[in-house]
Amino acid sequence: MPYLIRVSSQKGGVGKTTVAVNLSIALQCSGYQVLLIDGDTVNPSVGFHLGIEDSNTGVKELLMGKVKLVNARVAHAPSGLHVVPGVLTQEEYIVNNEMMQRFTAIVKNSNYDFVIVDTAPGYAVEHMGKYYNEALLVSTPEMASVANIVRLTAWFDRMHLEHKLVLNKVKGKRYELHDKEIEEMYENRITGKLPEDDIVPLSIEDHIPAYLYSRRCNFSKGIDKLAKTYYAVPGSKVPTMRRRGLLSLLFGGRRRH
């Protein structure tokens, strides 16, 4: 059964979607079968990051039972990643328990190793925790962002949902909290650290995930380390095929940093 990861943050602007997209790409390129779902019903942007912007069917139709997974997903050709994009709509909808039960039944019967869901910032509905294996919390190392994550952590603890913390946009500035301070607030270890890197905004502008844009940049190295923490999760198989070097051939003409 796929390992379901909910990528979450309490506030916007911390790079949650960037982390979700690049972690999915890194796991896919390590030989796992990965499905990335844009679960942000307010501001879906996974498709923008990947250059998939012409889809008129996505997660809403899947959750409502209007389409099957095979018709809702699209393939990201450069990586092989499967994506269920979000679709901008004027009609607001709220994911309810019935939708989540349908979603869980669908992914349980799929052949993916990981299903990663990029969610909207903020709190989750109380019952949603039981459908995921864990939440990956994304924060910047500033006090306001970490304090928000601590509040979100308490929410997930009440759901009995396991969680990990990854710090994004780490600059090494004096005004940033030290790792020890963050871990004391979070009451657990930091799982990953992703540095501020000029490659990230460039990659978003070009609709090419940073992990594909440059495997040698510091951000991609941080994503690699984060992806490796999932190699031994319960139920996941060890990847039998590595595609190291293939992406550099595909993107050999791109800018390198």
Image (spheres, rainbow, N blue to C red):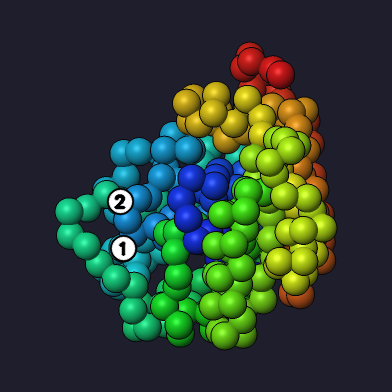
Q: Against 225, is 146 above or below? A: below
- Tell me whether the residue at label 2 lies in contact with that at label 1, contact meaning CB atoms closer than 8 angstroms: yes
Amino acid carrying label 1: it is: Lys
x, y percent for residue 254: 62, 17
Q: Residue at x 67, y 76 (%)?
A: 162
Of helix, strand and loop, which one carries label 1?
helix
Query: How many neighbours does mark 1 have within 10 angstroms: few (below 14), some (14-19), or many (20 or more)?
Result: many
64 left or right of 132? left
Work out whether mark 2 precedes mark 1 in sequence or the reverse, and give the earlier one: 1
x, y percent for residue 200: 59, 31
Q: Quadrant of residue 150?
A: bottom right
What's the distance in space between the residues labelled 2 and 1, CA to CA? Answer: 8 Å
Amino acid carrying label 2: it is: Val
Q: Which mark is residue 60?
A: 1
114, 158: nearer the viewer: 158
66 left or right of 241? left
